[in-house]
Amino acid sequence: MRTPATTIRPLCESDFAGFCKLNTNSQVRQFLGGLRAQDQLRAAFADRLSQTSELHFTIIDIASTEMIGLVSVAQYHEAGQFELSYQLLPAYWGCGIAYRSSTEIFRYALKKGIETVVAETQVANQRSRRLLERLGMEESGSLVRFGADQAVYKLSLTLQSRRKATGLKPPSDP
């Protein structure tokens, strides 16, 4: 998959260094449970690689060929639901990369038969909440998880596809 500035490809073993860079960046991990300890990184990475039924992708900057983020649609805490997740290095925040990468992963997920996606983010993470709303996701609930208030968002990918096919765009879609 491609966007104007990135290539999005399946996560592979050679992405471990980039995975570590994301998971040890305090800004990236601010709303994701904090920094991961070095000794936990290999197991967490191996776990992602082993999840063949889930969609884990690496975001590569075309200009530098560097790994700059991750985007995935994977099993949510609630059985039978799939969750959008993304991490991006701070230098790439605010450039539309998370929006475009998420849109591409939605298209791919729909092709794989996933019709509805949820996302969970800390209520305090206003940037992420704005992104989810811009993607057309609607807040569908709230809960406390990991010791923090969380907002849960939901999107019907089939409805989003119909909107795109008919030219109707959600109010927040550019």
Image (spheres, helix red, strand yellow):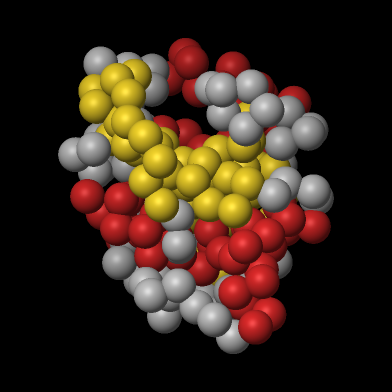
| Quadrant for the C terminus in the image | bottom left
Q: Is residue 2 above or below residue 72?
A: below
Q: Nearer the viewer, residue 61 or 105?
A: 105
Q: Quadrant of residue 132?
A: bottom left
| Residue drawn where x is 60% and y is 74% of the image | 163
Q: Position of residue 20 (x, y in %)?
A: 47, 34
Q: Furthest residue to the bottom?
A: 167
Q: Is residue 17 above or below residue 160?
A: above
Residue 147 placement, left or right of 45: left
Q: Position of residue 128 (x, y in %)?
A: 32, 50
| Residue drawn where x is 37% and y is 72% of the image | 172
Q: Nearer the viewer, residue 111 or 65?
A: 111
| Quadrant for the N terminus in the image | bottom right
| Residue drawn where x is 68% and y is 60% of the image | 158
Q: Nearer the viewer, residue 36 or 3?
A: 3
Q: Is residue 55 at all visible to an observer of this figure?
A: yes
Q: Position of residue 43 (x, y in %)?
A: 59, 17
Q: Quadrant of residue 165?
A: bottom right
